């Protein structure tokens, strides 16, 4: 069963950059006859905006991007994440290093590797042995993911008790999702996520990382860079613009969201997406 997903964190409303990625993921999975799922990555309450979740769901619906199954909330999966942590026990250690102590290092220096006894108030890290974990990306081709040199032993449960994004995503994508299409900003987390799925014995999806939409100065559109929220009242125009960034131009007479999405599904072609998207221009 082919299944893809769009997995926003509820840190702010959707912007054009999110729409571009959501639309590409939707089209590629629908073209392959698969199911497209929406998952809200709501595991980091301190970073979340209480209004964002509803705004995101409303915005996706306004743009005709409806999940084929009930929307998934990571906050409902605490039991699955804890059981994954149990399974990972032989690979875990309990780290007391502060951010300040680690600041001087490019990657985690392995300081607490010997601390194998569960200890409260410590971050839980996965032991990462030096290895090459290359994979073939649907957009980028061969990716040399030497994550040990990039990242080192990474955190799966934070000192404050919150499950880390990489673990939650590995548990939720493994076995369930066959196609992950997302922005290239997430390329660095792909190797850790794939590695966790392998340790957990889960099927690893295919990955496709498309370029991110950027402002003129090269900054990625994001909440931090103050990307303007999508105006849901202009959904058709927004979808046309998103298609344009991806390198497609739908014929002008198409004037309903459902026919535009159908056209997009039929014509979607990864090879047509430019290596660098045109810079963002507010509608
Ligand atoms: N929730 C993550 C974000 O919004 C993305 C998750 C993913 O696609 O893996 O950046």
Image (cartoon, rainbow, N blue to C red):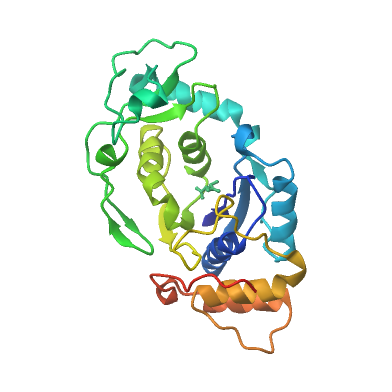
- Outermost front residue: 217
Of all residues, the one furthest to the right in this rendering is 233
Horizontal placement of 30 versus 115: left or right? right
The answer to which quarter of the image holds residue 197 is top left
- The image shows residue 237, relative to residue 222, as above or below, that is below
Residue that appears at 34% across and 27% down: 102
Q: Is residue 32 above or below residue 169?
A: below
Q: Nearer the viewer, residue 48 or 146?
A: 48
Residue 157 at least partly seen: yes
Residue placed most toward the observer, 134 or 68: 134
Q: Quadrant of residue 195?
A: top left
Residue 1: where, in percent of width, then height?
Answer: 52, 55
Q: Is residue 108 left or right of residue 208?
A: left
Count of numbered labels shown in the rendering: 0
Which residue occupies 57% across, 54% down?
6
x then y, percent, for residue 163: 53, 29
Answer left or right for 261 relative to 128. Answer: right
Residue 150 position (above or below residue 181): above
Across and down, in percent, residue 135 comes to 30, 52
Location of the C terminus (image quadrant):
bottom right
**Residue 113 picture location, percent across and down:** 29, 19
Is any atom of residue 261 visible in this view? no
Q: Residue at x 28, y 20 (%)?
A: 111
């Amino acid at each position: 069963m082919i299944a893809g997903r769009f997995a926003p964190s509820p840190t702010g409303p959707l912007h054009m950059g999110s729409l571009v990625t959501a639309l590409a993921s939707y089209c590629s999975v629908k073209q392959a006859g698969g199911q497209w799922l929406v998952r809200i990555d709501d595991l980091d309450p301190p970073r979340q905006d209480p209004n964002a979740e509803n705004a995101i769901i409303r915005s996706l619906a306004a743009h005709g991007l409806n999940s084929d199954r009930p929307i998934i909330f990571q906050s409902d999966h605490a039991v699955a994440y804890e059981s994954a942590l149990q399974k990972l026990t032989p690979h875990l250690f309990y780290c007391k290093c502060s951010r300040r102590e680690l600041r001087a290092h490019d990657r985690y220096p392995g300081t607490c590797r010997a601390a194998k006894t569960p200890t409260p108030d410590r971050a839980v890290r996965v032991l990462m042995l030096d290895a090459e974990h290359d994979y073939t990306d649907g957009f980028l081709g061969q990716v040399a993911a030497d994550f040990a040199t990039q990242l080192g032993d990474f955190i799966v449960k934070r000192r404050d008790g919150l499950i880390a994004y990489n673990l939650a995503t590995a548990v939720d994508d493994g076995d369930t999702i066959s196609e992950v299409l997302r922005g290239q900003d997430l390329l660095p987390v792909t190797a850790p996520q794939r590695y966790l799925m392998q340790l957990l014995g889960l099927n690893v999806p295919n990955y496709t990382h498309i370029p991110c939409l950027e402002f003129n100065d090269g900054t990625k559109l994001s909440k931090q860079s103050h990307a303007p929220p999508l105006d849901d009242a202009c959904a058709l125009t927004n979808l046309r613009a998103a298609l344009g960034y991806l390198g497609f131009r739908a014929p002008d007479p198409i004037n309903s969201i459902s026919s535009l999405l159908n056209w997009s599904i039929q014509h979607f072609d990864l090879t047509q997406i430019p290596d660098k998207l045109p810079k963002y221009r507010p509608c």
